[in-house]
Amino acid sequence: MVQFAVAGYARSQGKTLVRFGPTDLVSCRTLQGLTGKVYSLDWNPEKNPIVSASQDGRLIVWNALTSQKTHAIKLPCAWVMTCAFSPTGHSVACGGLDSVCSIFDLNSLTDKDGNITVSRTLSGHKGYVSCCQYVPDEETRLITSSGDQTCVLWDITTGQRTFVFGGEFQCGHTADVLR
């Protein structure tokens, strides 16, 4: 039944059905404005924004319902690999080949060029930051994984590590931790 509904919707909208095995998808919107490869995205289903991280050196926050950009954040390092929304959607985090995780407060003032400055930098990994994820329902705690064979639980308020998984405290990681 769902298969026919998706196919019917696609036809009625002049869209092309994309087949992924047992799942059929229809492109509803195309987000335009990125000039580099998109390496990561996160969606906050509570408020419908999407954040994307691309190799053009920007994080872009989109309204998923209208496809409009709400924020375009110039990153300190263009080599970004990951991004994540905080549970409330008030901030975004990103990390990459600079080995740090940068936090941006979406409610902060912008500079004269419209950029949001970094509100917190989490430094301590010895390799690239491959993934960052906020602890569910906790605006002040975040976990990162890295090419240095560690995962770190951070206290964003202080910028300090709360716990290190792996690395010199062997917990089973013997290679890069990707996600």
Image (cartoon, rainbow, N blue to C red):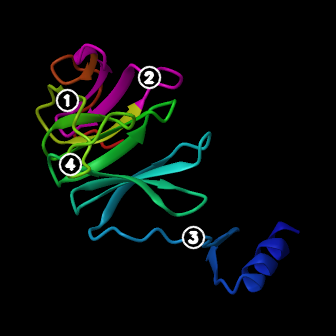
Instruction: Answer with mark 3 or mark 1, whichever residue precedes in sequence.
Output: 3
Q: Which residue is mark 3?
A: 29
Crowding at dot 1, Cα within 10 Å, few <14 / some 14-19 / many 20+, comes out as some
Crowding at dot 3, Cα within 10 Å, few <14 / some 14-19 / many 20+, comes out as few
Measured in 3D between alpha carbons, the distance from the residue under mark 3 to the one under mark 4, in whole angstroms, is: 25 Å
Closest to the observer, 128 or 61: 61
* Residue at 15%, 30% in the rendered image: 125
Q: Indicate the quadrant containing the N terminus: top left, top right, bottom left or bottom right.
A: bottom right
Q: Amino acid at mark 4?
A: Leu
* Residue at 78%, 83% in the rendered image: 12
Measured in 3D between alpha carbons, the distance from the residue under mark 2 to the one under mark 4, in whole angstroms, is: 21 Å
Q: Position of residue 123 (x, y in %)?
A: 15, 27
Q: Amino acid at mark 2?
A: Glu
Q: Find out whether the residues at labels 1 and 2 contact each other: C-beta distance under 8 Å.
A: no
- SS at circle 1: strand
Instruction: Answer with mark 2 or mark 3, whichever residue precedes in sequence.
Output: 3
Task: Judge from the rendering whether residue 32 lies leftward or rightward of residue 79; answer left or right.
Answer: right
- SS at circle 3: loop
Instruction: Answer with mark 4 or mark 1, whichever residue precedes in sequence.
Output: 4
Q: Position of residue 166 (x, y in %)?
A: 25, 23
Q: Position of residue 72 (x, y in %)?
A: 32, 54
Q: Which residue is mark 2?
A: 139
Q: Find out whether the residues at labels 4 and 1 contact each other: C-beta distance under 8 Å.
A: no
